[in-house]
């Protein structure tokens, strides 16, 4: 079974994040969901990103690093949207990564150096999500898949950014079920 460090999106630790983590736990995985926002939650992406900017991206990243420092190094790093930033940094820079799961976002690997050899990755996004499709994320994901031996990009029909968060109106049950199935297969393989 896998040990997963899972970072939340810009709305904070929502009930949907906890429900997703619980699904992974029910399959036997250990899942850690640290709070990058120190208890704050937000109603909109803009408010959450605004908070991250106010605190400073360096501090958000440091919070992610502190969360990882308390855990074994053999982790699968996962993140939803904003949470992909610390997840990707840790997957690329902290020795021992077992894998990476990026939901709704992906940065160019060059942001943190080269993608480490032997670290598998899955990227999940909606094929008409203006954030994922138009802000460079899908391009970064395609580049990562093309340059990495064990990388997969999954596109789901729809235009919602947070389609797998069951606590939000953007939730797409069918897409979320398929995403969860793929994630569980990935975790079983890398664990």
Image: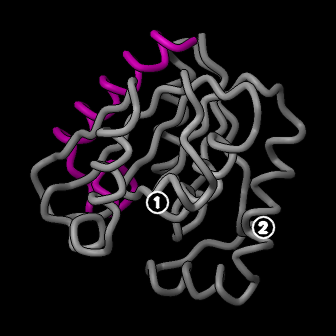
Give SS at disc 1: loop
Residue 144 percent location from the top left of the image? 38, 44
- Give the residue displayed 44% in from the left and 80% down from the top: 44
Q: What element carries label 2?
A: loop
- In the drawing, does residue 53 fall left or right of residue 9? right
**Earlier residue among tags 2 and 1:** 2
Residue 74 appears at what percent x and percent y? Answer: 73, 22
Q: Nearer the viewer, residue 62 or 48?
A: 62
81 relative to 123 in the view: left or right: right
Number of numbered callouts drawn:
2
Magenta-drawn stretch contains 190? yes
Q: Is residue 28 above or below residue 106?
A: above
Q: Which of the labelled discs sits on residue 107, or is there none?
A: 1
Q: Position of residue 168 (x, y in %)?
A: 35, 61
Q: Mark 2 points at which residue?
A: 38
Q: Residue at x 47, y 38 (%)?
A: 101
Q: Please tell me which residue lies in front, 90 or 128.
A: 90
> Which of these two is toward me, 69 or 161?
69
**Taken as a whole, is the magenta stretch helix, strand or loop?**
helix
In this view, the residue in front, 131 or 173, is 131
Q: Which disc number belongs to residue 35?
A: none
Q: Give the range drawn in magenta.
A: 162-191
């Amino acid at each position: 079974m896998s040990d997963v460090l899972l970072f939340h999106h810009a709305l904070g630790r929502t009930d949907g994040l906890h429900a997703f983590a619980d699904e992974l736990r029910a399959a036997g995985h250990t899942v850690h969901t640290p709070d990058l926002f120190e208890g704050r939650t937000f109603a909109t992406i803009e408010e959450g990103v605004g908070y991250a900017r106010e605190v400073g991206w360096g501090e958000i990243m440091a919070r992610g690093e502190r969360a990882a420092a308390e855990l074994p190094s053999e982790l699968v790093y996962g993140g939803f949207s904003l949470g992909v930033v610390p997840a990707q940094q840790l997957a690329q820079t902290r020795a021992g990564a077992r894998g990476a799961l990026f939901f709704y976002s992906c940065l160019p690997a060059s942001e943190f150096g080269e993608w480490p050899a032997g670290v598998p990755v899955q990227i999940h996004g909606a094929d008409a999500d203006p954030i994922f499709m138009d802000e460079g994320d899908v391009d970064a994901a395609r580049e990562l898949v093309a340059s990495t031996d064990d990388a997969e990009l999954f596109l789901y029909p729809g235009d919602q950014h947070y389609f797998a968060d069951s606590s939000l109106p953007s939730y797409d049950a069918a897409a979320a079920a398929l995403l969860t199935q793929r994630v569980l297969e990935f975790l079983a393989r890398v664990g």
